[in-house]
Amino acid sequence: MEQVRRANKKPLLVIGILSGLIFLSFFISLNTGVSRIAPLDVIKTLAGFGTEKEQLVLFEFRLPRVVIALLIGAGLAVSGAILQGVSQNGLADPGILGINAGAGCAVVLFIFFFQGSAASLSQFSIFVIPFFALLGAFLAALLIYVLAWKKGVAPVRLILVGIGINAAFSAALIIFQLKMTPHDFMQAAIWLAGSIWGTSWSYVWAVLPWIVLLIPFAVYKARYLNVLNLGDQVATGLGVTVEKERGILLFLAVALAGACVAFGGGIAFLGLVAPHLARRLVGPKHEVLIPASALMGALLLLTADTIGRHLLAPSEIPVGLVVSILGAPYFIYLLMKTN
Amino acid sequence: MGAVELKQRKPPQERQQRVASRPFVASCILIGGLVALVLGIGASISLGAADIDLKTVWAAVFQYDPEQTSHQIIHELRMPRALAAALVGAFLAVSGAIMQGMTRNPLASPSIMGVTAGSTFMIAIAFAFFPGTSYIGLMLWSFAGAGMGAALVFAIGSLSRGGVTPVKLALAGTAVGSLLSALSSAIAIHYRVAQDISFWYAGGVAGVQWVSIKLIVPVAIIGLCLALMLARSITILSLGEEVAKGLGQHTALVKGLGTIAVLLLTGAAVSVAGNIGFIGLVIPHITRFLVGVDYRWIMPCAAVLGGLLLVLADIGARLINAPHETPVGAITAMIGVPFFLYLARREGRGW
C-alpha cells in the first residue's frame, strides 16, 4: 500500500518514461525489417530527404503498421482496464471472456458471406468490418452478461461463463473457417492468431476514430470506475446511478475491444497484462490508470509486433502469438498470487 | 417430526450426488448402451459418401472379400474410423471421471486441464525437430505432452494461494492451453509444419488406420483395467481426502495410480484423434446423475456413454454439411458448451 501511495505521486514521470520508450521502440521498429534502414536515414526520410525506395518502405508499409499497432495496443489495454474495474476482478480480459472471439466470429462471417476472397477487401468493407466486429463483440458481451446473471453478476460466474462462450464461438469459427476456400482459410487463420494485417493508411483511418473518441471518453468516465470500486451500495449512496454508469462503461470496453479485434485479430492477454503493469506503476486511480494503461498497451503491442516480425525471421509470427507467449506466464503468475 | 427430519436430510439437488448408487439403472445403461453402441458403429460404417447397406456391412465384417470395393471401403476406412470413435470417446469419458472423482472438482477434464494442448505442443515439436518420426514415436511424444500439460496445470493450481478451486483450475487450464497452443503455432509457422499438425488441432477420427488402433488398444486396456481396479478407492476418495485417509486408504498411492490411468487414456485418445473437447467433462456428470456415486458403476457406464456420444458426433460430423466434413471437436464443443455454462451458473452454490 505504501508503495502504491508513493508511486501515486509520480504518474507524470511514469507517463513520460512510457512515452519515451514508445518513441524508442517506434524508431527501432521503423529501422528494422527485410530491408534495414539506418536510424539516421529513418530521421532523414521522415524529414523528407530519403531516397524514393526508403520513402516507399517507410511511409507506405512500416509507418501505417506501427501506427495501427500503437492504436490497437492502446485500445485493448483500456478495454481491459475498464473490464477489470467494472467486474472488480483482476483476471478479466476481453480475450479470456470471449468478447474477442465474438468479434472474430462476426468478421469471419462477413468475409465468408460478403467478401468471397479476403485478399480483395475493398475500401468500403474496410470501414464496414469494424461495425461487424462490434456487433459480434456486443453479442458475446450480452450473452455472457445474461447467462451469468443470477440476482446480480458474481465475478467468478462471469469469468466461467466467459470461458464457455469463448469455447462456443471458437467452435463456430472452426466450422465456418473450414467452409472457406483454402486461401481465405489461411487468411482467416493468420488473422485469428492475431496479426496486424492492414498495412495501408486506409486501415489507420478506419481504426483511428474509434480510439481517439473512445479513450478520452473512458478517461472522462474514469471517476465512476473509482466510485464503483467502493461497492454498489457506497456508489449509490454517493449519488451514482450504478447500473447506468456500469452499462456505459461496459459499452465502452466492448466497443474498444471490437474495433481493435477488427484490425488486430484475436490478441489475448494484452488487455489483462497492460492494466496490471500500469497499476503497479501509477496506482489504482482510474484517471491516471487509463492513460497509463493505454501507453503501456501501445508499447507492449509495438514491441511484440517488432519481435514477431524479426525474432524468427524470415517467418513472421503473428503478434497475437507473441503476446500470448509473453502474457500467459504473467497471467499464471497473477493467478497463483490471487486468492 | 419424521417429515421434518426427512426434509432436513434431503435438501434439493445438493445431496443428489450423495444418493446411493443405482445398480439397476446402471445395468440397464450398460446393456442398452452397448446395444446402442453396436448399432451406432454399424450406422457409422454404413453411412457416408458412398452409402452401403447394413447387409454388405455384415458381410464385409464377417466374410471379408478383398475383391469388392465396398468391402475394401468398409474394412480400410469405415471400420477403423467407427472403432476409433468408440474407443476415443470411452477413453476420454473414463479419464474425465477419474479426474473428477479424485479431485472432487466438477470442471476437471482432459481438455480443460491443458492435457490436449500439451499433446499438440509436443507433436508440433516432434514434427519440427524430428521429421520422419514414426507413428509410435508420435504417440510417445503425445503421451509426454499430455503429462506435461497436466503437470503444469496441477502445479499452478496447487502452488497458488487458496488451493485448487474450480475457477482457478479453469483459468489455469485456459492460460496453459493458450500458452502451449501459441507456442505450437509459432513453431508450426516457423518450421512450416502447420499442415502436418493442423489435423491434431481440429481433432477427428476421419483418417484413422488399423495400425493406430492396434497401437492404442493395449495401452488403453491397461488404463481401463487400472481405472476399474481403482474404482472403489476413487469412490471413497470422492467423499473427501480426510474421509478416505480416516478409512485407512493410501490416498497418495490411489492418486498416483489414478494419474497414470488418466495419462494413459488421454494420451492414447489424443494421439489418435487430436483435440476433442468436452466429452471428458460432460459424460462423467451425466453418468453420475444417472447411476449414482459408485465409481464401480460410473467407470463402465461412462465408457459406454462416451463411446456412444463420439460415434454419434462423428456421424453428425459427416452428415451436417455433406459432402464436407465438420470437425467432430466443434460438434462436441457445441454439445459441451451449454453443459459447461450450466455448471458455471451453479458456481457459488456449494462447489
Image: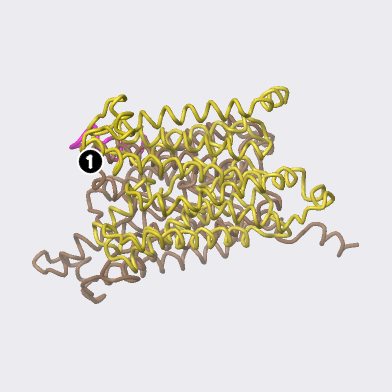
**Residue identified by numbered label 1:** B192
Please report the bounds of the magenta region as a residue range.
B126-144
What color does chain A have in the rendering?
A: yellow
Q: For the point 66% across and 52% down, which residue is it? A: B347
Which SS class for mark 1? loop
Visible in this render: residue B147? no
Visible in this render: residue A220? yes
Q: In the figure, is residue B349 to the left or right of A292?
A: right
Task: Pick the residue in front: B132 or A74.
Answer: A74
Task: Pick the residue in front: B250 or B310.
Answer: B310
What chain is tagged by disc 1? B
Q: Quadrant of residue B73?
A: bottom left
What color does chain B have in the rendering?
A: brown
Q: How many numbered discs sit on the rendered protein?
A: 1
Q: For the point 28% across and 27% down, which residue is it? A: A41
Q: Position of residue B160 (x, y in %)?
A: 60, 31
- Where the N terminus of chain B falls, by quadrant? bottom right
Amino acid type of the residue that numbered disc 1 sits on in the rendered structure? Arg
Image position of A53 with respect to B209: above or below: above
